């Protein structure tokens, strides 16, 4: 029995209990068994349809929340709260499905709650139940209701005639906790039912053979004692290709932009790994892998560029006066049309035999590298080679960083950004053989520097791409002048922000090339 709980207002919530009922036990047989010891009065049976939503990364589930659609209303409630209770409707819908992204919801509590938990992920259908509920009041000898119970039958909404699980719930009427205890004894001893602490959503997921698991786009590979550099690189490449696989179908289906982003991140990390540990697998295999990975990166570049521009539309609006917003809106329609075409092109490639052959070839190359005789570089211990590789990347960053001045060309700052990214990758690749103190000191500062360098680079790249878009405008179309004005305004605004960002780059660099970071990396030096 769940004991009585004190609510925020100080009153006590009655005790409750829940049991699993075998689907082979009919509602009529269950009622018949209960009436042997109790007077049971059945109410009116109700049937409702409840659809559950979450993201690919289970952003709500792992925050102990569930989002359901029922009777045209969306409800966000704690995961552990009984589905028998009625959570408040936070949004009435005019359509049969909710908005896909948090920013598409109207302003309000629901949007605020979702924004911090969904990120850029889309809401997806996680299953729908048809729930038949028969309320049953349990009476005492004085004909007073002492326990309110219900028999709930749950069916897959796609197969409503098939009950997949059944439950008996009971809650004491205030002041009758002892009667609930007696009722529980009847259920346990006479009906031999087991209590069930699982939520209805968990039961639904079990039926669908879905297991929510934490998702990360940066798999950690633990480096075992005595492990060679070749073994480490092979394990990391396997993990990265698994992530490419995991994000392929979502990219094809265009669920949300994060699938493509993580697809590309996995490809980019693999390419960086091969360049950072050159020779660990052998030149021939590394060259073939780099070529295949480079093609995957290139084929996805354009769609990702369009995604970024579309995701930045709200930010762009905030940078321009209202008089230029119509041109910005017209430009957004152009981008959306281009994105639609590019997404279809990429989806065709990802469904093709050519893509499958490429993935199969890369897997074979990795396994071949594992089976070949190790190279001199490949057989070196990862515990020794890893820190040396990290130090090499750090010294490169420090040398380039100290050379940056207010007049340094954008290209040199871009090169520094790439070096910082490679340093970050090496720290993550070899994390398990690096001192925790070094990582704790370096990573937060490096991440901050990367953010500043990334913004600087994005502002430069966006200006160049906007100029290209301006040049490619079809000036014969009616909305071209409005779009041209908006693009011109954006280019000027981004140029100003880009110049200010240079000062932030210089300020953050001063901290990263300083003595405390140098001391942290000194811990990696071999005696």
Image: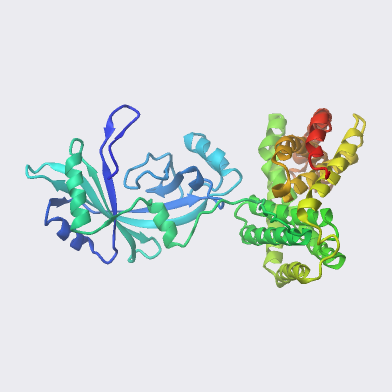
Looking at the image, which residue is at 22% across and 55% down? 188
On screen, residue 208 versus residue 306, left or right, reads left
Q: Nearer the viewer, residue 83 or 394?
A: 394
In this view, which residue lies farthest toward the left? 142
| Vertical order, 357 against 249 (above or below) | below
Quadrant containing the C terminus is top right
The reply to whether residue 417 is in sight is yes
In this view, which residue lies farthest toward the front? 527
Q: What sort of colour scheme is used for the picture? A: rainbow
Q: Nearer the viewer, residue 25 or 328?
A: 25
Q: Nearer the viewer, residue 59 or 522?
A: 522
On screen, residue 202 versus residue 118, left or right, reads left
Indicate the position of residue 412 as horizontal and vertical percent values.
90, 40
Tally of marks: 0
Looking at the image, which residue is at 23% across and 64% down? 26
Quadrant containing the N terminus is top left
Indicate the position of residue 75 as horizontal and vertical percent values.
42, 43
| Vertical order, 128 against 309 (above or below) | below
Indicate the position of residue 91 as horizontal and vertical percent values.
44, 40
| Vertical order, 507 against 125 (above or below) | above
To which quarter of the image does residue 502 belong? top right
On screen, residue 473 versus residue 4, left or right, reads right
Q: Nearer the viewer, residue 56 or 526?
A: 526
Looking at the image, which residue is at 78% across and 68% down? 369
To which quarter of the image does residue 357 belong? bottom right
Indicate the position of residue 414 as horizontal and vertical percent values.
85, 41
On screen, residue 435 versus residue 505, left or right, reads left
The reply to whether residue 428 is in sight is no
């Amino acid at each position: 029995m769940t004991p009585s709980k004190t609510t925020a207002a100080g009153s006590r919530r009655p005790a409750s209990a829940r049991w699993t009922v075998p689907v082979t036990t009919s509602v009529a047989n269950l009622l018949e068994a209960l009436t042997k010891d109790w007077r049971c009065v059945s109410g009116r049976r109700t049937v409702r349809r409840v659809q559950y939503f979450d993201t690919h990364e289970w952003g709500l589930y792992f925050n102990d929340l569930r989002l359901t659609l029922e009777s045209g209303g969306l409800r966000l409630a704690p995961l552990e709260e009984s589905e028998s209770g009625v959570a408040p409707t936070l949004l009435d819908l005019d359509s049969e499905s909710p908005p896909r992204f948090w920013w598409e919801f109207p302003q309000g509590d629901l949007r605020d709650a979702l924004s911090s938990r969904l990120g850029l992920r889309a809401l997806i259908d996680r299953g729908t139940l048809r729930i038949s509920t028969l309320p049953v009041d349990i009476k005492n000898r004085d004909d007073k209701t002492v326990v309110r119970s219900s028999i709930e039958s749950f069916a897959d909404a796609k197969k409503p005639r098939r009950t997949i699980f059944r439950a008996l719930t009971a809650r004491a009427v205030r002041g009758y906790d002892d009667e609930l205890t007696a009722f529980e004894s009847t259920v346990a001893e006479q009906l031999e039912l087991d209590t069930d602490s699982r939520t209805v959503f968990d039961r639904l997921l079990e039926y669908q053979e879905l297991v929510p698991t934490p998702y990360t786009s940066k798999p950690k590979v633990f480096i075992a004692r005595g492990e060679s550099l070749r073994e480490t690189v092979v394990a990391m490449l396997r993990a990265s290709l698994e992530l490419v696989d995991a994000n392929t179908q979502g990219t094809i289906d265009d669920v949300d932009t994060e699938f493509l982003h993580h697809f590309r991140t996995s490809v980019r990390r693999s390419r960086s790994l091969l360049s950072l540990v050159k020779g660990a697998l052998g030149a021939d295999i590394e060259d073939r892998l780099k070529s295949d990975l480079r093609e995957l990166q290139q084929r996805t570049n354009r769609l990702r560029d369009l995604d970024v521009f579309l995701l930045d539309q709200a930010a762009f609006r905030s940078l321009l006066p209202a008089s230029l917003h119509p041109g910005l809106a017209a430009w957004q329609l152009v981008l959306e049309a281009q994105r639609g075409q590019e997404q279809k092109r990429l989806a065709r490639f990802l469904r093709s035999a050519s893509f499958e052959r490429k993935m199969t070839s890369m897997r074979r190359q990795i396994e071949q590298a594992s089976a070949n005789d190790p190279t001199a570089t490949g057989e070196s211990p990862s515990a020794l080679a890893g820190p040396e590789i990290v130090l090499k990347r750090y010294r490169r960053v420090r040398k380039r960083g100290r050379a940056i001045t207010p007049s340094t060309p954008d290209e040199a700052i871009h090169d520094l950004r790439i070096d910082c990214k490679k340093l970050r990758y090496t720290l993550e690749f070899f994390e398990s053989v690096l001192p925790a103190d070094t990582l704790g000191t370096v990573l937060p500062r490096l991440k901050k520097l990367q953010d500043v360098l990334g913004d600087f680079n994005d502002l430069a790249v966006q200006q160049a791409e906007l100029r290209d878009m301006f040049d490619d405008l079809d000036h014969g179309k009616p909305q071209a002048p409005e779009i041209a004005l908006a693009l011109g305004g954006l280019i000027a605004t981004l140029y100003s922000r880009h110049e200010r960002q240079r000062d932030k780059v210089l300020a953050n660099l001063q901290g990263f090339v300083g003595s405390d970071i140098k001391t942290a990396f000194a811990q990696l030096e071999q005696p």
